[in-house]
Image (cartoon, grey):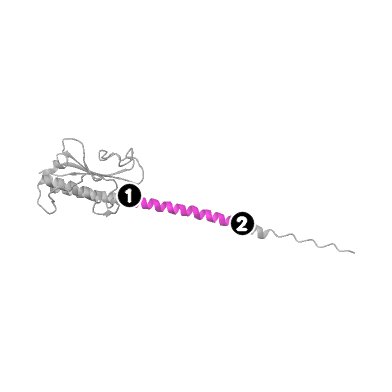
Amino acid sequence: MKRPAPARARPSRRRGAQAGFTMIEALVATLVFAFGAIGVAGMQTMSMQSTYEAGQRMQATYLANDIMERLRNNAEALDDYDNDIDTDWTIVGDGSIGTAPTPNCASAACSPAELVDYDLWSWEQAIDGAAIQQVDIGNVGGLVNPSGCIRVTGSGQVEIAIAWRGRRGMSNATVATGCTQSGLYGDNDEYRRVFLVRTYIAPR
């Protein structure tokens, strides 16, 4: 009696299926890693921008305190820094004062009026970062497109504001809107950042 031929073993699909699943898993893992890397890069960028903005604001705070002390030390000429008969600001910055005044009040005796000119020039130099120069660029140590502003409103009331250009457009600050210079902070001042301090300086 003839025996029936043994049934052929069906080829196993397990190895191919395993290989297929492994490729899918690798692809998913790659995508997850890529999205994670993009997220980390975005967070680093935001962190750097926040650090930059904080550094600029800290510098503006220091510069506002600097001119405040200069005004206190020369209070008898307070109206020469800004006349209180109007609401306009005295604005310096971004190279608006081209030449150093004479005499140099850091090394010579000056009258109160001469000290006003020297204080405004020195303050602008600090705001512009003129102490640090880079070849083919110029000032690199100060604020970006700065405006330093002084407003004497009468009876010893003084406002000091410093505006500079931020890296991202935002809603324009609603304080000290007169402390600005055309073309420095975008069409609608959307890149404008501002620090404002109000103080009282007893007239002499």
From the image, give the main secondary structure of the stretch colored magenta.
helix
Which residue is pictured at 40% across the width and 53% down the height?
Answer: 44
Tell which circle, 1 or 2, labels the residue nearer the N-terminal end: 2
Which mark's residue is nearer the viewer, 1 or 2?
1
**Which percent across, then down, holds residue 23?**
59, 57
Image position of 4 with respect to 52: above or below: below
Q: In which quadrant of the rendered image does the N terminus lie?
A: bottom right
Give the Cα distance between marks 1 and 2. Answer: 48 Å
Image mark for residue 53: 1
Q: Is residue 69 left or right of residue 184?
A: left
Image position of 109 with respect to 173: above or below: below
| Quadrant of res 193 | top left
Q: Is residue 199 magenta?
A: no
Q: Residue beneath label 2, please?
A: 21
Q: Amino acid at mark 2?
A: Phe
Q: Is residue 50 magenta?
A: yes
Q: Is residue 117 left or right of residue 59?
A: left
Q: Amino acid at mark 1?
A: Glu
**Residue that sits furthest to the right in the current view:** 1
Secondary structure of the residue carrying numbered label 1: helix
Image mark for residue 104: none
Q: Is residue 174 left or right of residue 118?
A: right
| Quadrant of res 197 | top left
Magenta-colored span:
23-51
Which residue is pictured at 59% across the width and 55% down the height?
Answer: 24
**Which percent across, then down, holds residue 59?**
26, 51
Secondary structure of the residue carrying numbered label 2: helix
